[in-house]
């Protein structure tokens, strides 16, 4: 695992938790966050990433761990907080120096620091992810040719593909 995210912490920091509270609002907000992460994390990072939520908000019948479009989602057991589960995952990390922990919780940050893992505040990480995604969009836009074909060029391409009759030479 290369990225470990404190789910509800990020929901609040990102302002994604909607006005509906309770099970319906929590589930909707979680889905919005998960979709955001899948859409904005680099594809190569998804299989190496995990987001952890407290089980108190988990919908009935949802497994304690599943994949959301390639992103590992895990709910803490009912007798354990997400913080305790994250501390356990940090402690069990085979290579904590390659682990980045996203949480604003100082307890989680201390656990990451003790193991030599990198950590970022949830709000700062969310802002950085949005900035990188926006930059990637700008770069993709810059790669598009900024050229409008002239009527003569359009006609030539249409003739080339046999769409328009050829002009007599």
Image (spheres, helix red, strand yellow):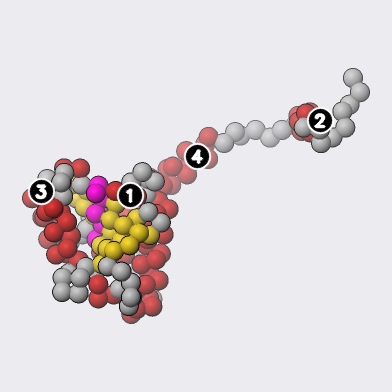
Residue span colored magenta:
1-8
Residue labelled with disc 1 = 47
What is the CA distance from the residue labelled 3 to the residue labelled 4? 38 Å
Q: Which residue is painted at 41% across and 64% down in the image?
A: 32
Q: Earlier in the sequence, mark 3 or mark 4?
A: 3
Q: To which quarter of the image does residue 29 belong?
A: bottom left
Q: Which residue is painted at 89% across and 26% down in the image?
A: 167
Asked whether residue 4 appears in the rendered view, the answer is yes
Secondary structure, mark 3, is helix
Secondary structure, mark 2, is helix
Q: Position of residue 126 (x, y in %)?
A: 32, 54
Residue labelled with disc 3 = 115
Q: Position of residue 84 (x, y in %)?
A: 14, 64
Left or right: residue 48 compared with residue 163: left
Residue labelled with disc 2 = 159
Q: Earlier in the sequence, mark 2 or mark 1?
A: 1
What is the CA distance from the residue labelled 3 to the residue labelled 2? 66 Å
What is the CA distance from the residue labelled 4 to the residue labelled 2? 30 Å
């Amino acid at each position: 695992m290369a990225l470990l995210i404190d789910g509800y912490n990020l929901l609040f920091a990102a302002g994604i938790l909607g006005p509906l509270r309770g099970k319906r609002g929590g589930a909707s907000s979680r889905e919005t966050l998960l979709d955001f992460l899948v859409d904005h994390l680099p594809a190569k990072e998804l299989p190496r990433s995990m987001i952890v939520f407290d089980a108190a908000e988990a919908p009935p019948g949802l497994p304690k761990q599943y994949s959301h479009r390639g992103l590992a989602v895990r709910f803490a057991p009912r007798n354990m907080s997400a913080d305790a589960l994250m501390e356990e995952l940090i402690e069990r990390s085979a290579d904590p120096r390659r682990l980045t922990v996203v949480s604003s919780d100082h307890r989680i940050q201390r656990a990451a620091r003790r193991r030599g893992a990198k950590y970022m505040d949830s709000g700062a990480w969310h802002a950085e992810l949005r900035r990188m995604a926006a930059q990637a969009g700008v770069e993709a836009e810059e790669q598009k040719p900024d050229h409008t074909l002239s009527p003569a060029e359009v006609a030539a391409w249409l003739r080339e593909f046999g769409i328009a009759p050829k002009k007599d030479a």
